[in-house]
Image (tube, rainbow, N blue to C red):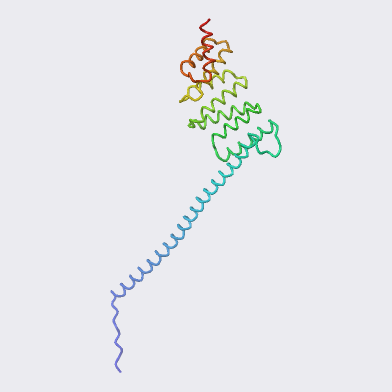
Amino acid sequence: MPRAIKKKVKHKDVAVETEVQDRISDIKELMRRKQRAVVMYGSAAALGIALVSGGVFYKYASDDKARQIEYEAYKVYHNEFQKSPLSKQEQFKKAADLFNQAYSKSKSPRLLLYIAGSYAEVENYPEAIKTLELFIKDHSSEKNLLPLAYRQLASVRLRAGNRADALKAFDSLYALQGDMFKDLALMESARILEADGKKDEAAGKYKEITEKFKDSPFYNEAKSKVDEKKAG
């Protein structure tokens, strides 16, 4: 019986086969790593999307809540749609509290003007002044609202009996860009100066109104003061 012929396996073939198997093992391991990476990064991306989405939702919810509180504050401030009438003290204390809550959720600068106005109405002048100074410090870029803040600050300081600081606020108001309230700043400054016996400085303010603001509602008063000065 013929003997089976054994194929002689060459050492070179064995080496090649071993190398191929090693390569396959390496590829499988690499694929496993990539799958883990895909899962990991996919999870991270999903988490990131969830966080961003959650942040957007939170901001929207927070802004929406702020708007609701702000709306309630306006109703109280103007004493409208109230179930029962409020005294002036109750009205503006409640309005200040609501506006403060709204501002804590959404830093809208106009809310500070309402907060200051509410404090001023109940003669809480220190808090009104503090609020307006915060507006000027934190929202000086609000060019349309800044004149309102300085006008309100000057008025509150004047009501509080601090004439010198009121005069400084009117000077700051006059120094702002644009013509908003410049005639008012001049007139109020002139009145303060005149009351303090500084008639020449006051006369200069009155004269400036007549020269620069002929359409001002203060023109006639200022002109009468100028004419009075000329008459001696």
In which image quadrant can residue 132 be found? Answer: top right
Q: Residue at x 46, y 18 (%)?
A: 212
User: Residue 105: x and y, percent?
Assistant: 57, 41
> Is 207 rendered above or below residue 55?
above
In the picture as drawn, the residue positioned furthest to the top comes out as 232
Residue 27, relative to residue 164: is it above or below? below
Residue 215 in picture, x, y percent from top left: 49, 20
Which quadrant would residue 84 be assigned to in this image? top right
Q: Residue furthest bottom?
A: 1
* Residue 124 left/right relative to 51: right
Q: In the rendered image, which quarter is residue 124 located in?
A: top right
**Which part of the image, by quadrant, shows the N terminus?**
bottom left
Given residues 68 and 165, the one toward you in this image is 68
In the picture, measured across the screen, residue 122 lies left or right of residue 200, that is right
In percent of width and height, residue 47 lies at 50, 54
Q: Is residue 221 above or below residue 150?
A: above
Q: Position of residue 98 (x, y in %)?
A: 63, 37
Residue at the image position 70 percent from the left and 39 percent from the top: 83
Q: Is residue 115 above or below residue 206?
A: below
